[in-house]
Image: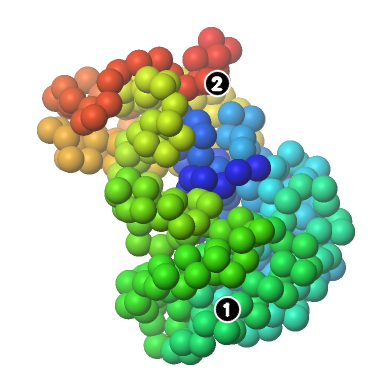
Amino acid sequence: MQHRFCVAPLMDWTDRHCRYFHRLLAPEAVLYTEMIAAQALIFGDVARHLDFNAEEHPVAVQLGGSEPALLAQAARLAERWGYDEVNLNCGCPSERVQRGAFGACLMAEPKLVAECVAAMRAAVDIPVTVKHRIGIDRNEDYGLLVEFVGRLARAGCETFIVHARNAWLSGLSPKQNREIPPLRYEWVYRLKRDFPELEIVLNGGLSTFDEVDLALEQVDGVMWGREAYHNPYKLAAVGRRVFGTTRVPPSRAMVVEAMSTYARRYLSEARHPAPQLRHVVRHMLGLYNGCPGARTWRRLLSDPVFLANNDVGLIERAQAAIEDCADEDLQSGSLPPGASALVRLV
């Protein structure tokens, strides 16, 4: 599986509804789940954690943990559930994650992480990848990054998604950890030169396609996180700008129609807890960002009465209420593969 363009795992955001939405916009991107703690997966509700839509492929599950045996067991569950990849989180700096002995703090223990990778590699046939920072705290020793990657590569990891900032394990909030430690793209580029046989994907701070173009001259792939979430329609240009496809991207209105159909299908499912419309529409709030009527769109989609009643008509009314918006640099066209088929099935 190639990682030329990926959408990052984002806690509380990239659930299956978000990923379905992103897939409509970017058929070529690799999508990731929110981080799932291995213990929560093994001892909790597996279906609640792992259920996803078939249209999401290629989709990877991100695991959090530091016990090789538990991670191997969780990886087997993910493979059995149909995921295309297992990714180990070695980049989250939050104190809650640190208390669980996983995330960015694992970069201080490359031997343990290598054991985790080896255990997962032995347990599954799908790829095992790692997402990590370039370092922790204020340590600026590039050699430690090389040691970390080299040890994991010898354990069988071939793809590294590298957030080009250090993670400060104390004194900064997760938000500050995305902004204050300086970006060092050159370290990631240098890593690719030092390990040409590995697939190196750059994450952190990228928000324009010009930046993506420059990065792809140096590394194998890029990952967008909050940019993709807050300005999702930019994903519609990924096919043309990153993969050189001639596929005509869908208009915003076409994506809204497909999401309305998807919401109806989701609400018809017999699940516990009961499906809620708000779980779907919250990911769509940024679809019209920068367009006339964007505020109206967000306000209508956030209407508490219609959301409480699971009234899918809310989506159509919001679409009808906003002004026509020209899709910059894009032309309206057919929905990506899978979306029109879903509309026919529902």
Residue in the foreground of this view, choosing between 183 and 31: 183
Residue that protrudes farthest toward the right in the picture: 122
Residue type at numbered disc 2: Gly
The answer to whether residue 231 shows anywhere in this view is yes
Relative side of 71 to 223, left or right: right
Helix, strand or loop status at disc 1: helix
Which residue is painted at 64% across and 72% down in the image? 149
Residue type at numbered disc 1: Leu
Relative side of 75 to 223, left or right: right
Q: Nearer the viewer, mark 2 or mark 1?
A: 1
Q: Alpha-carbon distance for marks 2 and 1?
A: 40 Å
In the rendering, at what x and y percent does residue 108 appear? Answer: 62, 85
Q: Is residue 14 above or below residue 329?
A: below
In the rendering, at what x and y percent does residue 334 appear? Answer: 40, 15
Q: Which residue is mark 1?
A: 145
Q: Quadrant of the C terminus?
A: top right
Residue in the foreground of this view, choosing between 308 and 207: 207
Which residue is painted at 59% across and 29% down in the image? 55
The answer to whether residue 39 shows anywhere in this view is no
Q: Which residue is mark 2?
A: 338
In the rendering, at what x and y percent does residue 123 appear? Answer: 86, 56
Q: Is residue 115 above or below residue 281?
A: below
